[in-house]
Image (tube, grey):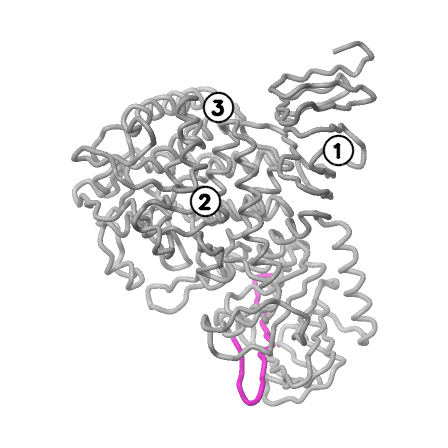
């Protein structure tokens, strides 16, 4: 959690210490943490990562934060720590919030547990703090004072017994007591819960699962004084000396993080985009990962950045920030198709289609051991983001061309999406000439994908030696997202998607077709269900107009994710597509993409749908409250048979029936939209007008006057 106001920043900003607080003030760092002690055993650092009971609630502005840990779990087992349902049980709670130039906090310590308060120097560069005259202090005025009982065990540590323990950490001196702290934090919690974006009813917890997970993963780049969201708190790679670096950013994870953050904090969404764009190398590589002293120089990750940046802009505004992002996104776009120095374009056979690759000459000796030992094929697979996808099994890596010897559907389609999105961004920024260039390049690669990567029934990767790959992956549906699929082919793709022997089922969609020999492995990208591919395919279905299938995908993904979140308090990296069991990291930043897809199925602004509302995903009543779009707050009330939309507390429209409104616009002159009706009839209400529509697809134009439309 981070409070952000000028140079004063605070929260659980140091990766190993979810149970700690770092305060950043004017370029200086102050750190302390609350280790747990039980029967002589100590849980500290990443050990506590596996003891988290629940992350949240947490406010983006730092006014309130609560995280709890389960001391009933065994200490020291790391990833062997059992995953159990989060029933009511005694837990250790850390609650805090901003109070002027400091923070006020409360510890609730269950019986049988002791807390070891430890003051330390974050990243080895913080200010020294020691016990002096009844409080812990630094030489430059930071102080930690308390109204609880403690036992000082060293100049930098204290032991706290069970019960309630209140504290203040900051740069002021004032008197307070425990009742005041409890009252203060209670007020902050009530205010946050009332004002936050939230959902009531059938999809309770949909928005909080996004915001609480993301905000509790937020960290600090201490060398830059900036906050960012990592792929997860444990994804901090080593520097050249082998020790953990200060921060690590992953490319496509970061853009997905920005899309998620736009739900509750547009400023954070833009800061995440800016943080990842700052990692670009001079030859245009926005790397798979980069840290303070190290980075992945030889390969990138899937080019989803311009699409998601455009999406953040449409939801949040910020043309100046979009303008700053544009040249970096443009440089990265040309990375894929232009040679520069030792970097070679990812078109190794120069046929206009793209292949995943790795610029071997650019690998630096300071890379982590697992990367230095990897061959070119593995590094190319890492560039795809789908590290061990069966599509890459046995595919040769061409050392001269720096790419796989296989034209790839996913990369070629994402590059087409990149070109389309950059064309839109250039248009928004008034760069008409460049917009036309991008549109022309988009048409060119779209034609090549459709001519060379369609086997007559499905889009497939194609070997340079001739012939198509036998594998069908979820990423082979990306041509839908790129908007390049002829209608008859789109219907064939939909048939594959809905076939229970291929991709459909209770837990969807798997990374590889169910009839693939590798599917039964259910390991990593070999048959499991992943948030990013599901999110991209979801938007591909929407772009193609397959609204019902998109909604069904969003519902099943959200149920899978929320089951893990509600019952186990986890935000998993992936899921078994046979059992639905969570796998991989326990807290992964892109886990809430499942929830984001469903939220966006109800209300969203997208590059091809414009402002969109729908009730296709409703099977019961839900209220979506304080949803922020275009600088305004929207409330949406939906059920299986109705929808009501309010803007800033004023009713805009309603309908009875089942349907989707796209490219929705309204003003004093009237309402205009594209309407798709999926029930026998739908009645649309706007400013006292009532218009009936049968099942079908319509252009709606209802003037504000009393004339008939």
Magenta stretch contains residue 34: yes
Position above or below: 316 against 191: above
Q: Which residue is mark 2?
A: 509
Going from N to C along the chain, the mark reached first, 2 or 1, is 2
Viewer-side label of 2, 3: 2
Viewer-side label of 1, 3: 1
Q: Secondary structure at mark 2?
A: loop
Magenta stretch contains residue 379: no
Could you say where residue 627 lies in the image, as x and y percent from the top left?
69, 41
Left or right, 570 with respect to 358, comes to right
Front position in the image: 136 or 90 = 90
Q: Secondary structure at mark 3?
A: loop
Label 2 Cα neighbours within 10 Å, binned few <14 / some 14-19 / many ≥20: many
The segment highlighted magenta reads 26-44
Going from N to C along the chain, the mark reached first, 2 or 3, is 3
Which quarter of the figure is the N terminus placed in? bottom right
Could you say where residue 568 lies in the image, as x and y percent from the top left?
58, 63
Label 3 Cα neighbours within 10 Å, binned few <14 / some 14-19 / many ≥20: few
Left or right, 609 with respect to 520, comes to right
Q: Which residue is mark 1?
A: 644
Residue 180, quarter of the rendered image: bottom right
Question: Is there any visible trace of residue 274 in the rendered image?
Answer: no
Q: Which residue is mark 3?
A: 431
Could you say where residue 675 lies in the image, as x and y percent from the top left?
64, 22
- Name which residue lies at 21% across and 36% down: 463
Left or right, 95 with respect to 285, comes to right
Position above or below: 399 against 687: below
| Magenta-drawn stretch, dominant element (helix, strand or loop) | strand
Viewer-side label of 2, 1: 2
Front position in the image: 257 or 539 = 539
């Amino acid at each position: 959690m981070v409070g952000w106001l000028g140079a004063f920043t605070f929260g659980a900003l140091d990766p190993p210490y979810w149970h700690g607080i770092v305060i950043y003030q004017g370029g200086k760092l102050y750190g302390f943490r609350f280790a747990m002690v039980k029967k002589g055993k100590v849980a500290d650092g990443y050990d506590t990562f596996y003891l988290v009971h629940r992350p949240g609630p947490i406010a983006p502005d730092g006014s309130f934060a609560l995280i709890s840990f389960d001391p009933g779990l065994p200490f020291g087992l790391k990833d062997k720590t059992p995953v159990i349902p989060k029933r009511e049980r005694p837990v250790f709670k850390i609650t805090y919030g901003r109070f002027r130039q400091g923070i006020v906090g409360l510890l609730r310590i269950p019986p049988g547990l002791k807390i070891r308060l430890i003051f330390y120097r974050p990243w080895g560069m913080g200010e020294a703090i020691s016990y002096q005259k009844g409080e812990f202090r630094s030489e430059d005025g930071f102080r930690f004072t308390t109204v609880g009982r403690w036992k000082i065990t060293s100049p930098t540590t204290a032991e706290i017994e069970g019960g309630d323990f209140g504290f203040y950490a900051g740069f002021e001196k004032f008197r307070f007591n425990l009742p005041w702290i409890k009252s203060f934090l209670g007020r902050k919690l009530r205010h946050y819960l009332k004002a936050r974006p939230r959902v009531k009813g059938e999809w309770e917890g949909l928005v909080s699962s996004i915001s609480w997970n993301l905000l509790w993963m937020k960290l600090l780049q201490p060398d830059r004084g900036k906050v960012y969201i990592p792929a997860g708190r444990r994804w901090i790679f080593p520097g050249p000396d082998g020790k953990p670096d200060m921060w690590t950013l992953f490319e496509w994870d970061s853009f997905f993080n920005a899309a998620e953050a736009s739900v509750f904090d547009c400023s954070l969404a833009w800061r995440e985009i800016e943080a990842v764009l700052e990692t670009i190398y001079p030859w245009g590589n926005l790397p798979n990962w980069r840290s303070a002293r190290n980075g992945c120089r030889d390969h990138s990750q899937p080019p989803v950045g311009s699409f998601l940046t455009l999406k953040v802009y449409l939801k949040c505004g910020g043309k100046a920030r979009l303008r700053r992002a544009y040249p970096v996104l443009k440089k990265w776009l040309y990375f894929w198709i232009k040679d520069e120095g030792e970097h070679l374009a990812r078109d190794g056979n120069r046929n206009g289609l793209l292949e995943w690759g790795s610029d071997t000459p650019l690998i630096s000796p300071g890379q982590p051991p697992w990367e230095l030992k990897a061959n070119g094929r593995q590094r190319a697979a890492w560039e795809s983001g789908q590290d061990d996808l069966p599509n890459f099994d046995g595919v040769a890596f061409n050392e001269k061309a720096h790419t796989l010897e296989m034209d790839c559907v996913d990369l070629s389609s994402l590059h087409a999406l990149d070109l389309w999105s950059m064309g839109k961004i250039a248009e928004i920024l008034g760069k008409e000439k460049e917009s036309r260039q991008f549109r022309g390049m988009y048409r060119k690669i779209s034609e090549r994908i459709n001519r060379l990567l369609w086997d007559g029934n499905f889009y497939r990767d194609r070997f340079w030696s001739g012939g198509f790959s036998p594998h069908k992956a979820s990423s082979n549906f990306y041509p839908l997202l790129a908007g390049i699929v002829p209608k008859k082919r789109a219907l064939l793709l939909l048939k594959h998607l809905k076939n229970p022997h291929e991709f459909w089922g209770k837990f969807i969609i798997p990374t590889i077709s169910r009839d693939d020999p590798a599917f039964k492995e259910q390991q990593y990208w070999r048959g499991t269900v992943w948030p990013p591919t599901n999110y991209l395919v979801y938007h591909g279905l929407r772009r193609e107009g397959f609204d019902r299938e998109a909604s069904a995908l969003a519902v099943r993904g959200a149920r899978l994710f929320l089951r893990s979140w509600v019952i186990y308090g986890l935000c998993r990296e992936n899921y078994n597509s046979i059992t639905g069991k969570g796998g991989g990291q326990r807290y992964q930043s892109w886990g809430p993409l499942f929830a984001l897809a469903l939220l966006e199925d109800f209300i969203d602004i997208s590059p091809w749908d414009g402002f969109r509302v729908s009730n296709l995903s409703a099977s019961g009543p839900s209220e979506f409250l304080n949803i922020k779009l275009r600088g305004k707050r929207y409330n949406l009330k939906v059920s299986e048979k109705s929808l009501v939309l309010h803007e800033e507390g004023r009713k805009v429209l309603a309908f009875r029936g089942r349907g989707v409104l796209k490219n929705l616009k309204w003003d004093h002159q009237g309402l205009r939209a594209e309407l798709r009706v999926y029930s026998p009839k739908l009645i649309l209400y706007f400013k006292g007008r009532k218009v009936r529509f049968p099942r079908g697809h319509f252009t709606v134009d209802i003037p504000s006057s009393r004339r008939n439309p």
